[in-house]
Amino acid sequence: MKYKALLTGVASIVLIAAGPSFADYNEAPTLKAMVDAGTIGPVADRLPAEPLVAQAPEVGTYGGTWRSALKGNLDSGWIRRSSGYDPLVKFSIDWDAVEPNIASSWEVNDNATVFTFHLREGHKWSDGKPFTSEDVLFAINDVINNVDFVPGARPAFLIGATATAPDPTTVVITLPEPNGLFLELMATVDGPQVTRFQKEFCSQFHPKYNPDAIKMATDGGLSGWGELLRDNCGVSRDGNADRPTLYAWKMLDDYDGINSVINFERNPYYFKVDQEGNQLPYLDKLQMTQVEDANSIVLMGIAGEIDFTNRHINNVTNKPVFFDNQEKGGFRIYSTVPADMNTAIIQMNLNYEDDGFRELFQNRDFRVAMSLATDRQEVIDVLYAGQGEPFQAAPRPESPFYNEELAKQYTEYDPDKAEEMLDAIGLTERDGNGIRKLPDGRSINIRVDVSSDLGPQLDILELVKIHWAEVGINLDVRKAERSYVYEQKDGNKHMLHVWKGDGGLGDAQLDSRYYLPMHLESGYAIRWAEHWTDPDKADLIDLPETVAKQLELYKKMFNSPSPEDRTKLFKEVLEITKSEFYTIGISLPPMDYGIATNEMRNVPENQPHAWVYPNPGPMNTSVLFKSE
C-alpha cells in the first residue's frame, strides 16, 4: 500500500461536509427512555442543525460496553486516541485528506495566514450547553497562548496565533506567519485542544476569570493555575470527570490514579449520525481498567477481557501469544500499518556538555563507523523472527518521500571497515579491557538509559552492546524508569538516547524529529532543536551552518501555501539528513497489529498507526458496535 502525500492546497478553499438529510433521527434506547422521562430533549433538538454523517462500514446496533485498559495513571494518550479525537478538522481514515469534523467548512486566504472555520449551528456540549466560537477563543487566546499555561500542553503550531469570532459559529484564526501545513496540524493528535475547553466550566481555573484560581492551585500543592487548568481540563490529564465534552462518550470517573476503573457513558448531544440517521455512538459505554504494566494488558487480552486495543501490547514478542490464544479468548488479531520507520533510533548527544565526548559524537565518521559495527540482521533474526530489513532514520517505502540511499546507507555489517575508520579518527589507544580511549585518555564508555516500558529497545541495545564491544567501544546499557530517562534527556544530561522511529508515513513532514533537530524529542540535538521549538533561546545557541540551512528549508516548507513547493523543499531537507547522518537506525518495523473480540464490529484493517495520526481515532470510533 502506497500512502499519498497530503497535497492540501490552501488558497481560497471552501470545504463543506455535505450529507443526506433525514426526516427523522434515531437514537439509543437508553436515550429514548430519558426523553420519555423528560430528562433530556428529543434527539433532533440535541443534534446540530447539520450533524456530521459518519459513514459506518456496517450499520450497527445500539448497546454494549467497549472494554480496554490504561497503563498506570498517566496513560491519557489512549483516552485521546480512542475516544478523544474530535478536532475542528480530522484526518481521513486513509490519511490522505483533511476532512470536516466539528467545523463543517473552512476558508483559507492566499498566503496561508488566515483560516476561517464555520461551526455547526446548534452544536452542544455533553451538559446540553451551546458550543460556540467563544469556547474556541478561550482555548486559543486564554489558554494555549498564555505563557503561564503548562508549556508541554501548548501546541507549537498555535503559539502566536490569535482567534476572533465575528459570530457564534465562525472562528477566524490568524497566524503570525504563513503555515501551509496548518490544516494538517489541526487534524493531528494535538488538534482537539482547540475543542476541549468549555469556557463556562474551565474558566473557573483561570485567574483572568476567577481571581481565586491561583490560590486554588497552591492550596492543592500545584505550582500555579496552569497546572490546575491542565489537571481539570487539559489533554495530558483527565482528572476531572465533571468537565463537559464534545466527544462520543463522557467520562464518569476521575482518572487520577485512585480509581482503578474509568467508566464512560454515551454523550446524549454527540454531533454525528450514521448514513441512516442513527445518532452515534452505537456503544453505550466505555470501560478502561487501570493496570500496572503492559504484561497485565496482555493477560487481559488473551483472556478476552479487552474488546479493542493496540496500545502497549503490539510488539513482535507478544504476537505469537495472541495468535495461539485467539480461539480460547474469543478474539482476533487485526492489522495496522505503522508510521514508525524504525525499531530503534540510536541518538548520540551532539550537544553533550562534556567536551571530549561531544567532539567524538559530532564526528560523522564515528557515527558511520558505529553504524557499520552494528549487526542489524542478527537483531532482526533474534528479536523480530526475521521480519523487517536493515533501515536508517528515513521515510518508509510506502511513503512518497522514500529515499533508498538515505534509508540504506551504512546498514551493511562491516566491523573491519568500522575498525579502520575508528583508527583513522585517532582512537588507537586502548585500556586494559580493550576499550578505545579518547585523546584525553578516558575510556569510551557510552551510557544509555532505556525506558523500562519501551519494549524491545532494551533487548536491541544489549545486542548492539556486543557488536560495538568487538570494535572497542563500550555501550553501558541501563534499564530506567521513563521519568528518569526524560529527566536526563530534557536536561541534556544524556550521552545517548534511544526511541522508536516516528515520522515514516503521512507524519514525515509534520513530525520530522529524526530528519532534523526540530523537536524536543530530537534527542541527538535538543539544544539545536530549540531554534525551532523556542525561538527566544535561538540567539544563545550556535548552529552549524548545515543545520541552520536545513532549518531554513524546513521553515520555508511550512510557510509555503503550495503543496508542490512543500514536497520539493522537504526532499531538500532529506538530502541534508542523508549527508549529516545524525542518528543510527536499526530496522524497518514489520506490519503492526491490534486485538479485537470476535463480537466487536467495524474494526478497520490496515489503518495507519502513528502518534500524530492517533489510531484508531480517525476511523470514527463512534461507529464501533458489538454483534449479538
Image (cartoon, rainbow, N blue to C red):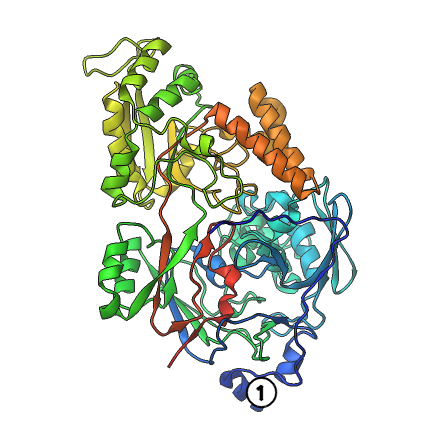
- Report whether 214 appears left or right of 346: right
- Report whether 624 appears left or right of 560: left
**Figure label count:** 1
Closer to the camera in the image, 608 or 468: 608
Name which quarter of the figure residue 530 lies in.
Answer: top right
Residue type highlighted by circle 1:
Val
Q: Position of residue 520 (x, y in %)?
A: 50, 36
User: Residue 388, relative to residue 93: is it above or below?
Assistant: above
Q: Position of residue 205 (x, y in %)?
A: 60, 56
- Report whether 513 appears left or right of 336: right
Which corner quadrant holds the C terminus?
A: bottom left
User: Residue 68, relative to residue 590: is it above or below?
Assistant: below
Looking at the image, which residue is at 64% across and 34% down?
Answer: 555
Q: Residues within 10 Å of mark 1 (few under 14, many from 20)?
A: some
Task: Check the image and name the residue furthest to the bottom.
Answer: 36
Q: What residue did someone put label 1 on?
A: 35
User: Residue 462, relative to residue 608: is it above or below?
Assistant: above
User: Residue 40, relative to residue 496: is it above or below?
Assistant: below
Q: Position of residue 532 (x, y in %)?
A: 59, 33
Task: Check the image and name the residue furthest to the left.
Answer: 432
Looking at the image, which residue is at 30% across and 24% down?
Answer: 373
Closer to the camera in the image, 222 or 257: 257
Looking at the image, which residue is at 42% across and 36% down?
Answer: 487
- Is any atom of residue 259 visible in this view? no
Under circle 1, the secondary element is helix
Closer to the camera in the image, 192 or 353: 192
Q: Position of residue 453 (x, y in %)?
A: 32, 46
